[in-house]
């Protein structure tokens, strides 16, 4: 069964770090582009970061670049988001999302077709 | 960055009537190499993650009833929901996946009148 399960959220103080994990199942993880998308309480959707296995291609939203690092371990079917120097405006539900596929070294950006249930990160003093 | 502008922000429609949501992108998101618009609609119900509803501007996901349709090309797109049902109450988001950052519209809150 196709599934993404996030973990690692919690309540942290400003300036600290947190690492989110997302375990994928039901599909060949290494063949897909993976993303983190966040949603602040009562707000809209905000793309955070993406990573392709091929060419180790990573992209970040301007608001998190230099503070957040996306990575993946294809042997464990797991996507990560290392979040450093957290700020109050990073408070959100963080969703792990599948979007895009690769055939060999040829990758195609595709819609975000599989979402996890999300993990809540609260940054507060 | 490509800016996605949705309208209206909220919408109340009677059961059985038609709801129309519009979305404009600040630049063309049609890729001539494969003749595809890199554009999607998502549905989000309270307490749930978003679900992909329509992609490539007009292709419905397998779970989506044919009351839902997507149209448009280039930089202007429309989501139409005919014969509105109570279970269609949700927030609807548009998105471009043409370029990183993969931006979303601000959302349209659809309610029953």
Image (tube, rainbow, N blue to C red):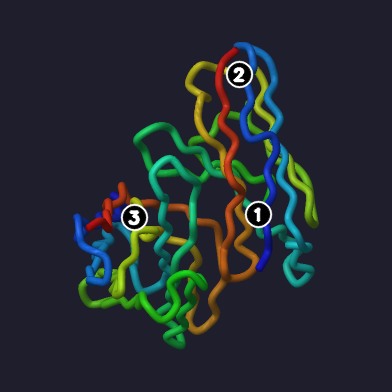
Q: Nearer the viewer, residue B73 or B45?
A: B45
Relative to residue A4, is residue B45 depicted above or below? Answer: above
Write down the quadrant of residue B22 in the picture: top right
Mark 1 vs mark 3, CA separation in Å: 27 Å
| Discs 1 and 3 lie in a common subunit | no
Write down the quadrant of residue B69 in the picture: top right
- Residue labelled with disc 2: B84
Which residue is drawn at the image coordinates 37% and 60% (left, top)?
A: A90
Q: Nearer the viewer, residue A104 or A46?
A: A46
Of all residues, the one furthest to the front in this rendering is A125
Give the percent coordinates (x, y) of residue A107: 54, 76
- Residue labelled with disc 3: A91
Q: Chain of mark 2?
A: B
Q: Nearer the viewer, residue A62 or A107?
A: A62
Give the percent coordinates (x, y) of residue B2: 68, 64
Q: Nearer the viewer, residue A89 or A103?
A: A89
- Residue labelled with disc 1: B39
| Discs 3 and 2 lie in a common subunit | no
Observer-side mark, 3 or 2, equals 3
Neighbor class of circle 1 (other Cα within 10 Å; few <14, some 14-19, many 20+) is many
Q: Say what secondary structure mark 3 lies in.
A: loop
Q: Chain of mark 3?
A: A
Neighbor class of circle 2 (other Cα within 10 Å; few <14, some 14-19, many 20+) is many
Q: Say what secondary structure mark 2 lies in.
A: loop
């Amino acid at each position: 069964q196709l599934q993404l399960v996030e973990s690692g959220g919690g309540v942290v103080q400003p300036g600290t770090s947190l690492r989110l994990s997302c375990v994928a199942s039901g599909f060949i993880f290494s063949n897909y582009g993976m993303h983190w998308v966040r949603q602040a309480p009562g707000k809209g959707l905000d793309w955070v970061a993406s990573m392709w296995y091929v060419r180790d291609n990573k992209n970040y939203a301007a608001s998190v670049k230099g503070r957040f690092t996306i990575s993946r371990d294809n042997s464990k079917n797991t996507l990560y988001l290392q979040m450093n120097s957290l700020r109050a405006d990073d408070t959100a539900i963080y969703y792990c999302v599948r979007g895009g596929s690769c055939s060999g070294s040829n990758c195609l950006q595709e819609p975000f077709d599989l979402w996890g249930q999300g993990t809540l990160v609260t940054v507060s003093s | 960055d490509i800016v996605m502008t949705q309208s209206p922000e909220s919408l109340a429609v009677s059961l059985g009537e038609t709801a129309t949501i519009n979305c404009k992108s600040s630049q063309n998101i049609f890729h001539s190499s494969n003749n595809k618009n890199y554009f999607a609609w998502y549905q989000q119900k309270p307490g749930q993650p978003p679900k992909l509803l329509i992609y490539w501007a007009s292709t419905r996901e397998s779970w989506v009833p044919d009351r839902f349709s997507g149209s448009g090309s280039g930089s202007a797109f429309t989501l139409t929901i005919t014969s509105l049902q109570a279970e269609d109450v949700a927030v609807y988001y548009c998105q471009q996946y043409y370029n990183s950052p993969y931006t979303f519209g601000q959302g349209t809150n659809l309610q029953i009148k």
